[in-house]
Amino acid sequence: MTTLKIGDQAPVFEGVDTNGEIIKLSDYQNKKIVLYFYPKDNTPGCTAQACNLNENYDILIKNGFEVIGVSPDSEASHKKFTDKHGLKFRLIADTEKEILAKYGVWGEKKMYGKTYMGVIRTTFIINTDGVIEDIISKVKTKDHTNQIIK
């Protein structure tokens, strides 16, 4: 579970996107960011979430947001996911789980009575000053844009 709170400075990060390009938090100065963490490409919930954000991407842009997705999947996996669904935003391949750890979203999960380590689906809204404006921990994958814009 994340220890970050609304009002905290967003942890700086650097990662590699779908096209092998370096992406950093500082690349988005003076922009609002939807930084969303999700467990795995091409799974039902993650696909629903990505497609909801993609379908509403123009609305998010009009509201001043840039969207960045982060998961521990590889660049190749992200590329297939992006191509399959025509995603308009960037995905970071955090295979070493460094960004996930900085944001406190890599942790213990339970499913079918088993405990395992995984991504805790969470979205951070970061304002133009790099401060966390909102944290969405109960993500509605099929209606995520409305949770962001509210």
Image (cartoon, grey):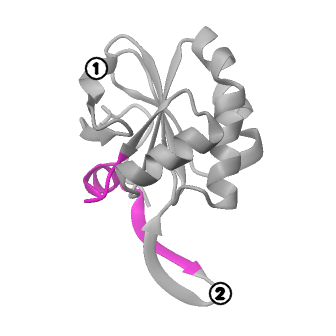
**Of the pair 31 and 14, the residue shown nearer to us:** 14
Name the amino acid, label 2: Tyr
> x, y percentage for residue 42?
60, 57
Which segment is the magenta one? 93-110
- The answer to whether residue 103 is magenta is yes
> x, y percentage for residue 58?
65, 16
In the image, 10: left or right of 2?
Answer: left
> x, y percentage for residue 27?
28, 20
Name the residue tied to disc 2.
112
Tell me: residue 42, above or below residue 23.
below
In the rendered view of the protein, which quadrant contains the C terminus? top right
In 3D space, how far apart are the residues under numbered discs 2 and 1 (Cα atoms)?
Answer: 41 Å
In the rendered view of the protein, which quadrant contains the N terminus? bottom left
In the image, 24: left or right of 118?
Answer: left
In the image, 99: left or right of 58?
Answer: left
Q: Residue at x 30, y 31 (%)?
A: 9
Q: Secondary structure at mark 2?
A: loop
Q: Residue at x 25, y 38 (%)?
A: 13
**Of the pair 87 and 6, the residue shown nearer to us:** 87
Name the residue tied to disc 1.
27
Which residue is at the far bottom?
113
Between disc 2 and disc 1, the foreground one is: 1
Tell me: residue 128, above or below residue 126.
above
- The answer to whether residue 31 is magenta is no
